Amino acid sequence: MTNISIDSFLSYTIGIIVFFIGVTLTKRFKTLQEYNIPEPVIGGLLAALIIYGFYIFSGIEIGFDLSTRDRLLVYFFTAIGLNARFSDLVKGGKPLFILLLLTLSFIVVQNLVGMGTAKFLGLPLSIGVLAGSASLIGGHGTAIAWAPEIKNLGIENALEIGVASATLGLVIASLIGGPIAKFLLTKNQLSNTKKSDPSVGIAYDKVKTETFNHLNFMSVILVLHICIIIGYLLNNIITELGFKLPLFVTCLLTGIVLSNIMALFPKVAWPARTRSLAIVSDFSLSLFLTMSLMSMQLWTIASLAGPLLIILTLQTLAAVAFILLILFPLMGKNYQAAVLSAGFGGFALGATPTAIANMTAVTKAHGPAPMAFIILPLVAAFFVDVTNSFVIGFLLSF
C-alpha cells in the first residue's frame, strides 16, 4: 500500500481551498442552503469522496498533517468561553434552568442509546459513546477531541467514526427541526401573538457601528493566547492530579472565568462579543471542520457503515421522542416551547448553528420567540460542552 502524506502548511492551504469550494457550491445550489448544510461540510465531504475514489482506483492512501487544525479547535472553544456571561443566566430565568436540566439529562439518554445499541450489535461500548453525545450533541469538535482517547481503547478508526456520526447527525438535524415544530403547532393549535420582527441570536452589547481594525484583531489574538497559556498550565495541573481533560476544555473554562472577571471592570477594553472575536471564531470553526472532513479516510469505516446507520437511526428516534414527550411539555407547551423543540432537534443531533437555523425558519413563518434565541445558545454553546466532557470521560473510564 502506497501512502502520500501532506504536511501541515499544505494541508492548511488545501483546507482553505476546499472551504471556498463549499462556499461556491452552496451559492449555486439553493437546496444546500434550504437544508442549512454548512460550507465546510459540503467542501470537506466532497474532498473526502474524491480522495476515497482516488483510493479505490489507485490503492494510494492520502493523509494530512492536522496539527494546525487541532490548534484551531482550541481557538474556537476559547472564543466561546470569552463570550460567556454569568449575567445571562438571570435573563434566561426558569426556562433556561429547565432547558439546561433537560439537555444534561439527554446527554445521558443519548449515551445509553448509543452504548445499548453498540452492545446489541456486538460492538465495543466506546463506539456507542462516540456515536452518542461525543459526536451528536457534542458535534465535530468534541468527537475529534475525544477520538485519540477512544483510539487508545482499541478503536483505530475512532476519528473517522466520530466525524461520520457528527456529519450524518448534522444532516438529520437540519431535516427534523421544522417538521417537529409544525407538528406541535398544528396539534396544539398554537400561535404567536407578538408582532415584532424575529430575533436571531443573543443581542451583543456593542452597537453596529463598532469599529474593526488591525488593533482590535491583534488584541483578540493576544487575549486568546493568554487564555490558552493559562488553560494549558491548568490542564497540566489537572493531569498531574490524575484527571484528564482535553486541552480545549480547560481553555474554555479559562476564557469564561477571565471574561466574567473583566466584566467587573467596564472601563477596561476586553474583546468579548466583538466583531474581531467573531471573525477569529468563525474562521477557526470553518477551517477546523473543513480540514476534519476532507481528511476522513472513508475506506476505514466501510465495514461499520451498517451498524453506524442503525445507531444513528435509533438516536434520531430517541431525540424525537424526548422532544415530543418530555421537552415540549416541561417547557410550557406554548409557542416558545415549540420553537425550542425545533432548535433542540437541530442541536441534539447536529450543532448550535443548525439549531438556530431551525428556529429561524419557524419564527419567520409564525413570529418571533426572543427568549428561545437567548437560552438555547447559552446552553448549547457553553454548559453542554463542559458537562459532556465530564460525562464522556466518566463513561470511558469504565
Image (cartoon, helix red, strand yellow):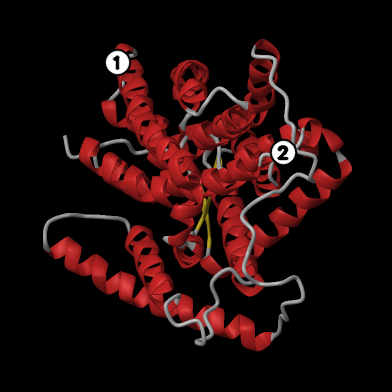
Q: Quadrant of residue 372?
A: top right
**Residue receiving disc 1:** 122
Quadrant containing the C terminus is top left
The residue drawn where x is 72% and y is 38% is: 36
x and y, in percent, of residue 8 in the image: 52, 66
| Circle 1 crowding by C-alpha within 10 Å: few under 14, some 14–19, many from 20 | few
Q: Which mark is residue 36?
A: 2
Q: Label 1, label 2: how many angstroms apart (C-alpha)?
A: 35 Å
Above/below status of 185 relative to 380:
above
Q: Is residue 64 visible?
A: yes
Under circle 1, the secondary element is: loop
What residue sits 70% from the left and 15% below the top? 189
Q: Looking at the image, do the residues carrying marks 1 and 2 touch, with CB atoms under 8 Å apart?
A: no
- Mark positioned earlier in the residue sequence (1 or 2): 2
Using residue 54 as the reference point, say whether residue 125 is left or right of it: left
* Residue 386 locus on image (x, y percent): 35, 50
Residue in front for this viewpoint, 3 or 215: 215
Q: Residue furthest front?
A: 193
